[in-house]
């Protein structure tokens, strides 16, 4: 009798306004999940394996329908199952030779993630902290410039050229400390330094050439900036012209967009 009264009470409550509840009997299990716990969709995948290479622009606008069909996960049209992050390494061995824009420009975001994750610091903060802790100071014996970096001037050591400079001009730009250097002999490597134009030793355009070829004549041995007046070229001879530095070379351009 008590059991019958309880069932009647439940039915009365359902009919009286709790219609949103549903009684079920038997041993049927819960309904099949269409999404994994946490709102993830196990069917959210890319059909292509290189969606990241197309860049963010390919996810919207005139490409939206194509992106939904081919790159749904990359373009965030759905939320896929959590995945293990790829290793925090560079696939290319010259990532540092590209300008900083290769890491920060959204147009190259996919390229950077696929090729230069470590250099562009596109890994989790915890992983980067571990890698930074393992990074040791470059020993002086390896703090060597790959180029005659003076041709680029100090303006190539920072800003958009910083990554390039760290790879090619670490000593010149002060990113490490090289071995002590011995001053070259105080002598001229050319016999006719006095035959050059009188601004040979003072014109910044010729400074590097003059330091290498007319070091003694230009009084660079003692840190001077030019010859004494008594040793300046005479006005009766036709002055020679040293080869100018010309336009300074520039670091490599950004990678071509995929």
Image (cartoon, grey):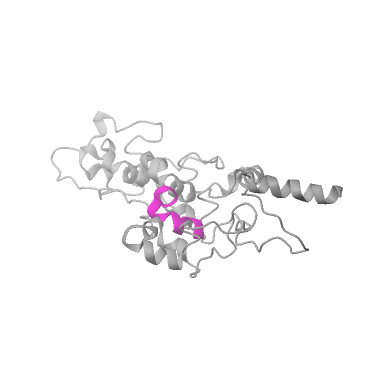
Q: How many marks?
A: 0
Residue 159 image point, x, y percent: 39, 41
| Magenta-drawn segment | 100-115
Q: Is residue 109 magenta?
A: yes
What residue is drawn where x is 54% and y is 61%?
A: 91
Tell me the quadrant of the picture where the C terminus can be found. bottom left
Residue 11 image point, x, y percent: 71, 50
What residue is drawn where x is 32% and y is 51%?
A: 249
Residue 55 image point, x, y percent: 41, 58
Position of 192 with respect to 76 (left or right) is left
Q: Nearer the viewer, residue 235 or 3?
A: 3
Position of 230 with respect to 65 (left or right) is left
Q: Is residue 101 magenta?
A: yes
Predominant secondary structure, magenta span: helix
Q: Which of 180 and 191 is in front in this view?
A: 180
Q: Can residue 188 be seen in this view?
A: no
Q: Which of 152 and 134 is in front in this view?
A: 134
């Amino acid at each position: 009798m008590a059991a019958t009264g309880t069932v009647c009470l439940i039915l009365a409550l359902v009919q009286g306004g709790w219609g949103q509840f549903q009684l079920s009997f038997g041993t049927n299990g819960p309904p099949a999940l269409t999404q994994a716990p946490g709102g993830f969709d196990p069917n959210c995948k890319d059909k292509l394996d290189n969606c990241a290479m197309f860049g963010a622009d390919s996810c919207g606008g005139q490409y939206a329908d194509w992106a939904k069909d081919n790159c749904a996960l990359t373009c965030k049209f759905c939320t896929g199952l959590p995945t293990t992050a790829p290793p925090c390494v560079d696939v290319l061995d010259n990532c540092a030779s590209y300008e900083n824009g290769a890491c920060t420009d959204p147009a190259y975001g996919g390229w950077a993630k696929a090729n230069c994750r470590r250099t562009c610091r596109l890994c989790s903060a915890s992983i980067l902290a571990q890698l930074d802790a393992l990074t040791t100071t470059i020993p002086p014996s390896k703090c060597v410039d790959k180029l005659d970096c003076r041709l680029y001037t100090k303006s190539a050591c920072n800003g958009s050229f910083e990554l390039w400079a760290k790879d090619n001009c670490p000593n010149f730009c002060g990113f490490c400390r090289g071995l002590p250097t011995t001053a070259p002999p105080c002598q001229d490597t050319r016999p006719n330094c006095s035959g050059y134009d009188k601004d040979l030793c003072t014109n910044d355009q010729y400074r590097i050439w003059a330091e290498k070829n007319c070091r003694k004549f230009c009084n660079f041995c003692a840190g001077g900036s030019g010859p004494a007046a008594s040793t300046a070229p005479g006005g009766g001879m036709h002055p020679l012209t040293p080869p100018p530095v010309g336009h300074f070379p520039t670091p490599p351009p950004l990678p071509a967009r995929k």
